[in-house]
Every structure is written in C-alpha cells, then in structure tokens.
Image (cartoon, helix red, strand yellow):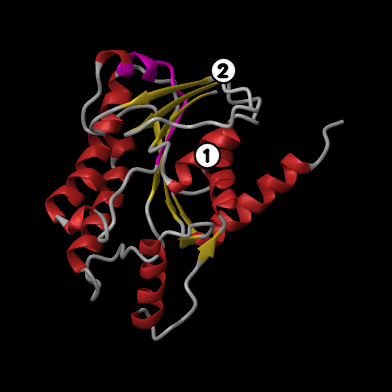
Amino acid sequence: MKLIIAGATSLLGTEIVRQSLHIREITQVVALARQTVHLDESIDSSKVRTFVIDDYGQYPDDVKAEFAGADACIWTVALTPLQADFDFTEVKRVCQDCTKLGFEAMYEAGPARPFRFIYLSAEGTPRDPTNDPVILPDFFIMRRNTELMVQRFPTEKEGVEVCIARPGVIANSTTWSRTLVVNLFRIINRFGRTLPNIQRSELAAAVLNQVMDGFEKETLLNADLVRLGRRELKLRSTPRL
C-alpha cells in the first residue's frame, strides 16, 4: 500500500507516521507537512518520503508526481479557533478549501482504484442543518459543511471511497491550548458531561486499519474509533505464527 499522510507533524500525524513504519503492508508513505518531519533514528524510515510544503492548497509538480498510484490518504490538516488568532477566513481556507484542493491534486495525479480518503473531523460537529451550534457557530457550521463536501467526493470522482472520522479529545497532549479547549467544553457543553476521548495511539491505529482494510462505515464516531484502535493494537501485539 502507498499511503499519503497530510499533516504529518500534527499531534496525530506524527503518530500515524510512526505506526506506519511498523506495518509491513504499507510499503510507501508520502508525508506532507509545513515543517520537517523528525523520525526516530532507530527505526527504518526508508519507505517514507517527506515533503515540506508551504500551503496545503498548492502542490509543486514533484509532490504531485508522488501522489500517483496512492491507495489512500489520511487527512489531518485543520486549524482550530485557538490558532491563527481565529482569523476565520484563514481557518475556513485551511479546513475547507485546502481539503478540497488537496484531494483534487491527489485524484488528478492518478491514484489507485479505489482511492480511500479519510478526513479527520471532530466529535460533536453538527450534521443536522436545522440544529445550529450555540458555541462558535461559524466554526462548527463550516466544519459541518466540510464533512458534507467530503461525502460528495465519490459522487464527483470515480473510484473514490471516503470516511469521516470524528474523534473526541485526543489524549497525550500537554499543550495549554488543547487543555483550555477541554476545560471550556466541560463547562459549557451539557453542563460538565465528560467529553468523549481517545488515546492518540488508538486513533492512529484505527485510521490506519480503515485505510488498509476498507471503511466500516462512512462516519466513525469516537466510540467506533476507540473500538477499532484497540482491536488493531491488540492484533499487532499478537505474535504471528
């Protein structure tokens, strides 16, 4: 399998790259990032080709050439309300416009059939257009519209399969911004109800499992991802006969 990982230096992206190095079925990895991807020197990283790009909406010819024959893409690129000083125009461009432009660049390069594209969204993104969110409505409506846009890819391009992954809070992060988001939603989201959460290793294992074995369903909620991730990690830890 040839796999594209977009956002390879993100919290999740680095773990996906790390785990992909240990999966023999994945023979080529194209890692896209805004900065250099640092890999553990003790691990054989010969199957990874890293490309530092300035903009996820624009791809040089040498990067487009690497997309040819790809079997799947895991798209983790996004900005949150606590990034980019919440310039909504830029947040929307990165979250929505770049997702479409990135997908189109990959498709135009001639990927394998089927080409599996998994988009990382977030638990709680409203899908019902009659149920607008109270908190940060512009942001969450934009994320909803992005999900709907991704779901239309198979109707617009032949040989495409898509999946929306909706994890809750991704554990293993100590950044103040992510902690602030967690505390904020604990206060205002349903009066302190515990938020769905998932370990970073479980989420990476879950999305890797899905691009390799096929999508279980079009939208994977946090509980689905926890189940798939734990199952995948358990299978990997079982000695092969």
Q: Which mark is on residue 16?
A: 1
On screen, 241 above or below 236?
A: above
Q: Nearer the viewer, residue 172 or 122?
A: 172
Mark 2 and mark 1 in contact? Answer it, CB < 8 Å: no
Q: Which quadrant of the figure contains the N terminus?
A: top right
Q: Is residue 182 visible?
A: yes
Q: In the rendered view, does 123 fall on the left or right side of 104?
A: right
Percent of width and height locating residue 84: 21, 52
Residue drawn at x 22%, y 71% as measured from the top left: 132
Answer yes or no: is residue 211 visible. Answer: no
Q: Tell me where the magenta segment starts and ends, as one range.
A: 63-75
How would you rate the neighbour count of disc 1 (Cα within 10 Å): few for under 14, some for 14-19, many for 20 or more?
many
Q: Amino acid at mark 1?
A: Ile
Q: Earlier in the sequence, mark 2 or mark 1?
A: 1
Residue type beneath disc 2:
Ser
x then y, percent, for residue 13: 46, 41
Per the model, the C-alpha gap separating discs 2 and 1 is: 16 Å
Q: Is residue 29 magenta?
A: no
Check disc 2 and report the residue beneath it.
46
The secondary structure type at the circle numbered 1 is helix
